[in-house]
Image: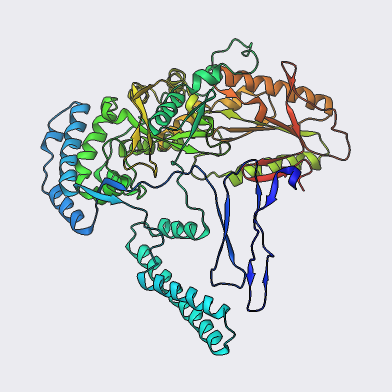
Amino acid sequence: MYNLHVVGSVDFPTRLTVTSATAIDNVFIDVSKLHDCVVSPFLNGLSDHDAQILTFRAWYPKQLIGTKFIRKVDQQKISDFLLHLSNESWSAVFNSDDVNLTLNSFLDTYLKIFNASFPLTKVTNQNKGNRWITPGILTSCKRKRELFLIKLSTNNPLLNRYYKKYCNVLAKVIREAKKMTYNSRTAKAYNKTRTTWNIVNELLGKQHSLNNIQKLTVAGNSFTNQQDIADQFNRYFATIVDSSNSKKLGSPSNNNLLPYTYLQNIEDNHHLSRVFKSFSTKEIISITKSLKSKDSYGCDEISPRILKLSANYISSPLTQICNRVMSSGNFPDRLKYSIVVPFFKKGNITDPTNYRPISIANVLEMAMYMRLTEHISLNNLMTDQQYGFRKGYSMEEAIFRLIYEVLNALNDKSPVGSIFFDLQKAFDSVNHSLLIKKLPYYATAGKAQILIKSYLSTRYQRVLLKTSRTNSNVVSEWTKVYYGVLQGSVLGPLLFLLYINDLPKALPAKIIPILVADDTSIVITRPNIGELQQALTASFHHLNGWFREHFLSLNFNKTYFLQFQNKNYNNSNTSITIDNTPVTKINQIKFLGLTINDSLT
């Protein structure tokens, strides 16, 4: 072990009794990585084995004690807020035909009442630790330790029994203190389910902040300043398309077709009814109350929770604004500013490519989503091969479809294989011009097309970081957004589904695509190995060409080919090659959370 730089650090007795002192516990340290370590005993009173405390130097962010400003929301303030809203006539909202002036008038009035009812309050930012630890419990624990030390130096049976009884009573008191504390936190919480899970994670030691990013590495340069990290994230999110386009595999498809040519054979849908119909007040109330009760907010600092509380009092002006937007085809400029939060997926926490931007939706987006979804569903415009972000469809159905097709082929003793494609930052790579050109094929022309174009154009974003080291949020500068759809919004994923809706039409006949948003897989069955080989290669080239034409970048290193086993033939020679590079062949894959192997066992 010494050759591996691992040495023991305990050179003192760790188990003490009245008659003996032995060293039977140890802490082994890699001295090549940890320096200036000190190990000392600690009489914990829980066992006759002493605890060992290892102390070493390490960089770890500490909670800063300082002040910050928050808005306290209680029942009295909510009542005052709703009272003021009920007395507002909103006359300026109804007296203007300009969408921007109408929205600005509404928000200015609403925010004035909001700020008056929920003023910013200065509070001390402290780490409270375990809230159930009272002064009485601290005193009792200290007394327990004193009794333990006395018990070690004597062999008095009465003292031993008293100590044991004292420990049992103290343990019961601690359990009751924890129970009272957690019950009180849950009872006072607005979102009781979330609070319960927060308590569970605290007890399991899993509490952490997904947004507590202490270090970021970009192009070999490390950034630890929070402002620098926010700026680097914003720069990365704004240039995802530029960097991914430079890494695209292969040459463009040589079919000389425009990206939306696959839609030419779709039945003419221009005769269908208008997409964005007017809203009733009842519908707007329902949309507002369907918001998740979250305290997160956008540029205006109004959380979905507050909007839901005031739904009945602002339904008339909101209905006026929504209907004005739908009829004019003009999305308000004020709502084109998005605050995005980096959401960690997996991998290296310091690598910005392992994060995706999440933004916050608003009522108007939900209204557009509602009408567009109704239009797509009523006219059956979405491909049946798409299982993501659709009501009545699920990942379980996608898994079933893949397994069903493979089992059918194996039962018929036919060769069958699947390709699982991985796209890089697909949502962030949507080309706005191409998406707009596709809309008329889904009967989303005229004012509907103009509104979606207005929604996507001249958008801006900035990154927000919330950390435990600072008393205020850190934000980047505003950056114009030229590509992509908003993740975290309800409308963004739906627009993405329309963007890739014609993907199945790019495939040769008898190829079965399975789409779950941007997760694309295909199942191919052929009478013999030779035809399967040709179909696999042709399908890969067709889809890779389609991806390139749609400015989507294929992650070749995470794209896999799996041929399913059939005892009647040998599949060892089947392969797919593009630009002299073989596609990775595997014998099992995790498909939508389910591990599938080549024999479906």
Q: Position of residue 464 (x, y in %)?
A: 37, 35
Residue shown at 27% from the left, 45% from the top:
68
Q: Nearer the viewer, residue 543 or 234?
A: 234
Q: Nearer the viewer, residue 414 or 47?
A: 47
Q: Is residue 105 above or below residue 408?
A: above
Residue shown at 32% from the left, 43% from the top:
471
Q: Is residue 554 left or right of residue 417?
A: left
Q: Is residue 357 left or right of residue 543?
A: left
Q: Is residue 5 left or right of residue 136?
A: right
Q: Quadrant of residue 128?
A: bottom left
Residue shown at 28% from the left, 51% from the top:
124
The answer to whether residue 379 is visible is no
Q: Position of residue 320 (x, y in %)?
A: 21, 36
Count the labels in the image: 0
Q: Position of residue 594 (x, y in %)?
A: 66, 46
In the image, farthest residue toward the bottom: 158
Q: Nearer the viewer, residue 169 or 411?
A: 169
Task: Describe the colour scheme in one phrase.
Answer: rainbow
The answer to whether residue 321 is visible is yes
Q: Is residue 558 left or right of residue 68?
A: right
Q: Quadrant of residue 512?
A: top right
Q: Position of residue 597 (x, y in %)?
A: 75, 42
Q: Is residue 10 above or below residue 37?
A: below
